[in-house]
Amino acid sequence: MAEWVTLAEAIATHVHDGDSVALEGFTHLIPFAAGHEIIRQGRRDLSLVRMTPDIIYDQLIGAGCAKKLTFSWGGNPGVGSLHRFRDAVENGWPGPLAIEERSHSDLANAYVAGAANLPFAVLRGYAGSDFARVNDQIRSVTCPFTGEVLAATPAVRPDVAVIHAQKADRKGNVLLWGILGVQKEAVLAAKRAVVTVEERVQTLDAPPNACVLPSWVVSAVCEVPRGATPSYAHGYYERDNVFYKAWDKVSRDREQFASWVKRHILETQDFAEYLLLQREAKEQATLT
Amino acid sequence: MSISYTSDEMMTVAAARMLWNGAVCFVGIGLPSTAANLARLTHAPDAVLIYESGPIGAKPTVLPLSIGDGNLAETAETVVSTPEIFRYWLQGGRVDVGFLGAAQLDRFANINTTVVGSYEKPKVRLPGAGGAPEISSSAKEVLIVVKHSKRTLVNKLDFVTSVGFGTGGDSREKLGLSGKGPVAVITDLCILRPAPVSRELEVASIHPGVDRKTITDSTGWEIRFADGCGSTEVPGPAELGALRDLMARTARAHGVEWEEA
């Protein structure tokens, strides 16, 4: 059964140094508040997994939390590069970052395999590409029925999955909607799952077939309004495109990034205080 | 009397024309998304736009800034999970056209979006594959839209992310890829198409006002001009009007200065 706890407690209990951690959310419902709390608590040597690293992993990587990244598309959507990610890969700053690079289709399949308790994913992919040359985990399997050779890749089985959702009821049953990405698969593939939600409600009133994660597959649930900012939560708030654009400047420079993390994450008590700072910054029409 | 237009507008209009009404199109973000939506707003109102984040039949009123903008979900016929999009709809063979961009492209329409330089010590670390490798292998056909320069159309890719015609000839068939591969590359200078046997890209149509030398000088390999290479039709007022309205709506909606990704 999911326990209702504060985000600080959830991260302290369920995310440990050296864990493999998947913070998922495909552009939508990205668990920024949880990512910040991981930085705030100073986690190290994490093996991060995520299809689209986005700004949240740029922050985790730049803050020195990660030793490895498994991913399939690492950019700032609609803006350009993830500069902290690039600095880590190109220059080893703030430390070396091992990368395991795959395609979206592969990682999506690998989460499904993980959720289904299978050792590997099978897909039609990678033929003729250079991926297998740089990632020895991309292998092949021959169909025992047709003889077709298919790509085989290891299942994703994180120690902990972290997602953000719209609602959870008092028992900790979670409801999400809109663009669902691989969140359900990530939660079911992981040993533990931390879920932040926009609001705690008495009942979910979810229609049949809605995407509900029952309380008993979730370890901890935390109420964190606007916890996906600057990404969006369908039905609650829109994507903060200005922040995504401004991040390009903040993240280009190591010192500017470090002072941003210090002021906005390390020196704030929680995400609510971070949001307050953001609001003040906006009022002054600056983000730094 | 034609209206004046930019080479980028010519590119987007020429790319949009490639999409037929009713086509099921798996859309990449940036230029492909602009072209696919322009097609939907002009001659192809029943084109079905699929984005890898899960929306099927998206009809966004403004261009998405990211591949998973809320506007895509709100206007879609249905929104499915990311595994379902790739497993049932793309790999399942339901996609007529994959519409892609590229950081680097070679003469056989193979795409690199991974690294410039060596993989281990890259000069530039690019975002990576996203959905492109499986889009380029599983969509029944592929369109690529890209700005024409020597930096982009290169003699040799630093990394093959997504396969077009491999090493040319029948190498794509030998790899067992189900779709027939790239049918056209639309740039701001011209339209390239694969030659029938060698599968090497050659210039099939030159945009108005562009000369052959400019194309040759902007291409990283010795580009060939197809027999019967023609001239692209200038963008019409309806095409330009729809495109400019779309760009203006998009700029207003995003509250940021809009640039193509």
Image: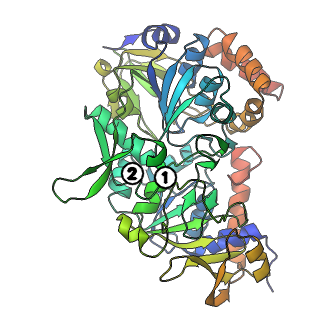
Query: How many C-alpha atoms fall within 10 Å of the one at disc 2: few (<14), some, or many (≥20)?
Result: many
Q: Which residue type carries mark 2?
A: Phe
Q: Is residue B101 above or below residue A197?
A: below
Mark 1 to mark 2 CA distance (whole Å): 20 Å
Disc 1 is placed on an element classified as loop
Q: In the image, are marks 1 and 2 on the same chain?
A: no
Residue A188 on image: x %, y % = 32, 28
Instruction: State the image quarter where residue A108 is shown.
Output: top left
The residue indicated by pointer 2 is B86
User: Residue A31, can we see it?
Assistant: no
| Chain to which mark 1 belongs | A
**Which residue is rendered at x = 71% and y = 63% of the image?**
B245
Instruction: State the image quarter where residue B225 is shown.
Output: bottom right
Q: Is the residue under label 2 in contact with that under label 1 (CB below 8 Å)? A: no
Marks 1 and 2: which is nearer the front?
A: 1
**Which residue is rendered at x = 61% and y = 79% of the image?**
B202
Q: Which residue type carries mark 1?
A: Asp
Q: Is residue A40 above or below residue A97?
A: above
Residue A96 on image: x %, y % = 60, 26
Q: Pick the residue in front: B123 or A155.
A: B123
Say the numbered circle drawn on residue B58.
none
Say the numbered circle drawn on residue A130.
1
Q: Is residue B76 above or below residue B39?
A: above
Q: Is residue B23 left or right of residue B64?
A: left
| Chain to which mark 2 belongs | B
**Which residue is rendered at x = 49% and y = 16% of the image?**
A223
Residue A139 on image: x %, y % = 35, 46
Residue A170 on image: x %, y % = 37, 14
Disc 2 is placed on an element classified as helix
Looking at the image, the residue that sits furthest to the left is: A145
Q: Is residue A209 left or right of residue B59?
A: left
Q: Is residue B242 above or below residue A188?
A: below
